[in-house]
């Protein structure tokens, strides 16, 4: 049970935040009062089951509005979450991240991206955040004075998967509107799905602007990963277990760490633990390592 | 390896400012703007333009 605690939380959270089951049968989205609140992970608000708003969608919408104001509400929410837990959200409370992890479990040879290619690609998500989520929606205006949510419209595979595909399948009215844009976004979704079978969480590593935003707060967040330097024997087990290719004993609060906690499970000396405001959260130290798969390979 | 695990002043200041932004945004009607957008099917998000 505890071994699979994270998976259980990911699934329960995914179900709870997409619990408008009726929507999947009617091809309609939830319109109740909870849509005022953002969920912390990527979760398209046009998903028929979604009961909350996607923070990236809400931010894009605020920036593209004709009578736009500084988005205090959405940014305040995103910074609060980032400062409290950093990318813990990616590891524990993101539905798309869960899907990517499940796809990676399909038994196929896994692709190891060489570091000289992987490292620069990691910066792509910051570019997506700065250019597609903030820059272009802020500065581009059409003849009517409205902007375009570039990330949501041209890149986001979450919207296609959670909103586009079910709504198009369930809603006859929407089907005639399918065009090149849907085909483009569907292609991106297929690429994300296929690459997730061979690469651990490729969207999170290379493209997700929300992960990039939370990563900015990783080093100052209240929740942190702690290394007990006196207990660490530099065996490298934590680095081998890390699907995000982080070396937790060297950089425990790396911007790439999604705080999934796999490293804390495999450390033979119990040298890694989570802390909140300096207080330890993880269970007491173990002497024997837990068997694990090498996700990075 | 020296590691600082206790959050410093930057963390608490950022958290305070973020909560202030969130509350100010909510009371100034921005939560309603999020609601208005989120209760309509977002054609851009689902790829229908």
Image (cartoon, rainbow, N blue to C red):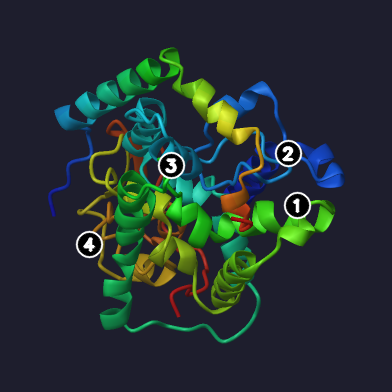
Percent x, y of residue B26: 44, 18
- Give me the chain letter of mark 4: A
Q: Which mark is residue B6?
A: none
The answer to whether mark 3 and mark 4 are in CB contact below 8 A is no
Camera-side mark, 2 or 3: 3
- Nearest the viewer among A75 and A91 is A75
Q: Give the answer, above or below, for where A121 lies relative to A168.
A: below
Camera-side mark, 3 or 4: 3
Query: Which residue shows up at 65% across the image and 21% down it?
Result: A33
Mark 1 Cα within 10 Å, few/some/many (few <14, many 20+)?
Answer: many
Q: Which residue is mark 2?
A: A29
Mark 3 Cα within 10 Å, few/some/many (few <14, many 20+)?
Answer: some
CA distance for labels 2 and 3: 24 Å
CA distance for labels 3 and 4: 46 Å
Camera-side mark, 2 or 4: 2
- Nearest the viewer among A70 and A53 is A70
Q: Which residue is mark 3?
A: A146
Mark with earlier residue (2, 3): 2
Mark with earlier residue (3, 4): 3
Q: Which residue is mark 1?
A: A167
Q: Which residue is mark 4?
A: A250
CA distance for labels 3 and 1: 25 Å
Mark 4 residue element: loop
Tell if the residue under mark 1 belongs to the same chain as the one under mark 4.
yes
Question: For this view, does A148 lie left or right of residue A45?
Answer: left
Tell if the residue under mark 2 belongs to the same chain as the one under mark 1.
yes
- Give me the chain letter of mark 3: A
Seen as rendered, the residue at the extreme bottom is A109
Question: For this view, does B39 lie left or right of residue A73?
Answer: right
Tell if the residue under mark 2 belongs to the same chain as the one under mark 4.
yes
Percent x, y of residue A247: 29, 65
CA distance for labels 2 and 4: 45 Å
């Amino acid at each position: 049970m505890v071994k699979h605690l994270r998976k259980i939380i990911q699934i329960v959270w995914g179900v709870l935040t997409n619990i408008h089951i009726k929507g999947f049968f009617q091809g309609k989205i939830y319109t109740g009062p909870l849509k005022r609140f953002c969920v912390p992970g990527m979760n398209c608000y046009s998903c028929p089951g979604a009961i909350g708003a996607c923070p990236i969608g809400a931010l894009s919408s605020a920036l593209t509005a004709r009578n736009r104001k500084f988005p205090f509400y959405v940014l305040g929410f995103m910074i609060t979450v980032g400062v409290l837990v950093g990318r813990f959200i990616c590891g524990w409370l993101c539905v798309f991240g869960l899907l990517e992890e499940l796809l990676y479990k399909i038994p196929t040879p896994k692709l190891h991206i060489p570091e000289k290619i992987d490292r620069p690609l990691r910066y792509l998500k910051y570019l997506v955040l700065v250019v597609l989520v903030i820059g272009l929606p802020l500065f581009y205006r059409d003849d009517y004075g409205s902007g375009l949510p570039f990330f949501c419209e041209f890149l986001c595979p979450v919207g296609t998967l959670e909103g586009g595909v079910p709504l198009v399948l369930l809603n006859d009215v929407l089907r005639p509107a399918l065009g090149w844009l849907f085909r483009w976004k569907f292609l991106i979704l297929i690429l994300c799905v296929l690459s997730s079978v061979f690469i651990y969480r490729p969207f999170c590593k290379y493209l997700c602007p929300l992960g990039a935003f939370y990563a900015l707060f990783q080093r100052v967040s209240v929740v942190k990963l702690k290394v007990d330097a006196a207990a660490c024997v530099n065996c490298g087990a934590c680095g081998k277990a890390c699907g995000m290719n982080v070396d937790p004993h060297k950089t425990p609060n790396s911007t790439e760490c999604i705080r999934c906690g796999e490293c804390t499970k495999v450390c033979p000396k119990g040298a890694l633990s989570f802390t909140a405001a300096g207080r330890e959260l993880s269970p007491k130290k173990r002497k024997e390592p837990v068997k694990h798969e090498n996700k990075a390979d | 390896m020296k590691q600082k695990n206790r959050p410093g002043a930057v963390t608490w200041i950022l958290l305070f400012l973020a909560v202030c932004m969130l509350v100010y945004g909510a009371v100034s009607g921005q939560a309603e703007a999020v609601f208005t957008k989120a209760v309509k099917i977002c054609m851009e998000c689902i790829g229908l333009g």
